[in-house]
Amino acid sequence: MRRIVAILFPVTISVLFNISLLGWAAFNSEQRVNQVFSPFSAIVSFLILATGLIPAFARPQKVHTLIACFSIFFASFLLVPFEASDIPALQVGQPTINFLNPFLKIRLLQAAILVPMTLHLSVRFPRPVGGWTLGKLLGSYVFSILLLGALLSSVYAWQRVVALVLSLVWLTFVIAFFFKNLFTAAQDANPEHLLDAQRARIMAFSMLIAETPLWIRPLTLALGLDIFSYNLLLIFQLFVPLGIAYAVLRHDLFGIDRALRRTLVYGSVSLLLLTLYLALTTSLTSLFADSLTSRPLAPLISLFVAAVLFDPTRKLIQKGLDKILYPDRLKFEAAVQSMQYLLARANRREEIIDLLTDVFPNQIGAEWGALKLFPDPDVPPPHTSPAWNTRLVAGSVTMGGYWLGPRRAGPGYDADEVHRLNALAGQAALALAYANAYERLYELNRNLESRVKEQTEQAMTDQTSIAAYEERQRIARDLHDSVTQQMFGLHLMARGLKAAAPDDFKDKLAELENLASGTLKEMRVMLDQLRNASGGENVDFAESVRSECDAFSNRSGPEGGALLSITLELPREMILPKNIAREAALALREALQNIVKHSGGRNVTVGVSADSSLRVRVTDDGAGFDARAVPAGHYGLRGMRERVLALGGELTIDSEIGRGTMLTYKIPLPKRSVAE
């Protein structure tokens, strides 16, 4: 209540003050007010008055109240025309006030108040200017009244000239200060002051056109020149309400809601349409009354025709007004329709995010747009002030939150636009849910393709392994049918020759028989390996170790008995990759052959274990040797070490002369390659 009183009180005082001035002038001049103003000056004054009063009542603020008071004084100042012929002839020796008519006196008083009021307004609009205290502003009013008093009380010509010059200087200073503030605000590049800059540019343009003649005319009249007629001056003043109306409609000057602005405009248009409707009805009634034989039918037909024409006319005018006065609304509706079309065809998450955070905000002129999707927290970006926000919900699932910043220029989002935004958010949530499902299906399809490819490659590998297995079986058959039979025949021949040979050859033939027998056994071991090798990538290394050891245990030594007496320490089954099992078996064979050739021992222990690595330990009771001084030309140990190192393993030898030898090698295994 106090706020309303504080706003209405200055406006009421200004109205009463100017009405009192006009009443006083009319009383003392014996002329009515309607006799001294023209219809054109009344129309211009009414437009300026309405332009100033609407913001004060629509958006009550101190600066709007000041604008309303200024418009009251300015409209009253323009109401009474003033031409060069109205300037009285002044005489020396008498005060100037004695020669002025009452209406000219009140115009000078109004002008004396308008000049400091313009200064007062310029330090408050479009934004406050620092350094101007209330005392300084009151001093400007006092100074202006003193200048008026000096002019009215001047007796001599030089006094009048000085008073007029000071008044023109004072008016020039105020107008220059006013435009300086407007130009400064118009050139402000700060994004936070963008709207103020747009308003200031419009106001500066319209006020410059309107007020330049208002400043030049007093100067020309003082010089005795009559360049501007009063009606021409009034025409220029129309730029003030036009500029303010444009700034209100396009850039939300004075912060008037768009719904209120639309109501004011549509109310005026509806009033105009109603007037046209009544005029059309009256004209049609008169027309049909002359052409119809039944006069009572004329009003009914005219009302019907006017009613049929009224709605299309109203819609056509409303569409034109929306296009001219509210382009932001049309722009918003076009952007929403475009987004609905794009969201209906989007199937990628990144595309939808770009539409909501970049494309749509730019289309509607919003300063920014932000989208937070689950599992990110549903909070707006820091240091922002959203003008609208909602949650994106698809069914019962919350997809995230969506925020829009205020428009760069124009009003906020009204109720109808908020409803459209909420509907668009629902469509965006469904589009995101569809995109998520589409991407999961696409990823599942890719995984399925990868698995099919892997299984196809595995099947091809298995087919290759089967072919290799069949080839090994064929080689084994060929070796058995050719080389093995020949070695068996050689063995029998050596045995037969030994029975009939002289004693000198029996030992050599016995050695030949043993060699043929050993070779035949090794051939059988090789045939067993070829026959037992599977088509896969893994083999039973335990079986390979038993076969290698049997080949040496089943051979006779030079003094009779087994060539080697081997004790095995290994699990029943040990499945290893084929390449590792093969190299480890060949290294074991080389170790056993070295024992036969060099150690002279007959008892051997072979231990095999596996966890993350394959460990093979071969211990004999032979003569031993110095591992650091291996004679030249012996490549067995070197070959064993190279085989183990090629698989990333290591080989160690622990031996001394007279104490036997323990050879150990370790080979790393891939994961899940051991089965016991």
Image (cartoon, grey):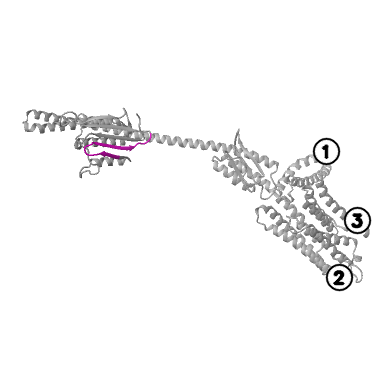
Q: Residue at x 64, y 49 (%)?
A: 367
Q: Which of marks 2 and 3 is in front?
A: 2
- The percent position of residue 596, horizontal first and vertical second, equals 20, 35
Mark 1 Cα shell of 10 Å, populated few (<14), some (14-19), many (≥20) = few
Q: 622 or 306: nearer the eye?
A: 622
Which range is magenta? 651-671
Mark 3 vs 1, N-terminal side: 3
Q: Does the magenta stretch include residue 295?
A: no
Q: 431 or 548: nearer the eye?
A: 548
Residue at mark 3: 23
Tag shown at residue 183 = none
Tag shown at residue 297 = 1
Tell me the SS state at disc 2.
helix
Q: Please identify the residue farthest to the left as the structure is shown.
A: 502
State which quarter of the image contains the N terminus: top right
Query: Can residue 167 be seen in this snapshot?
Result: yes
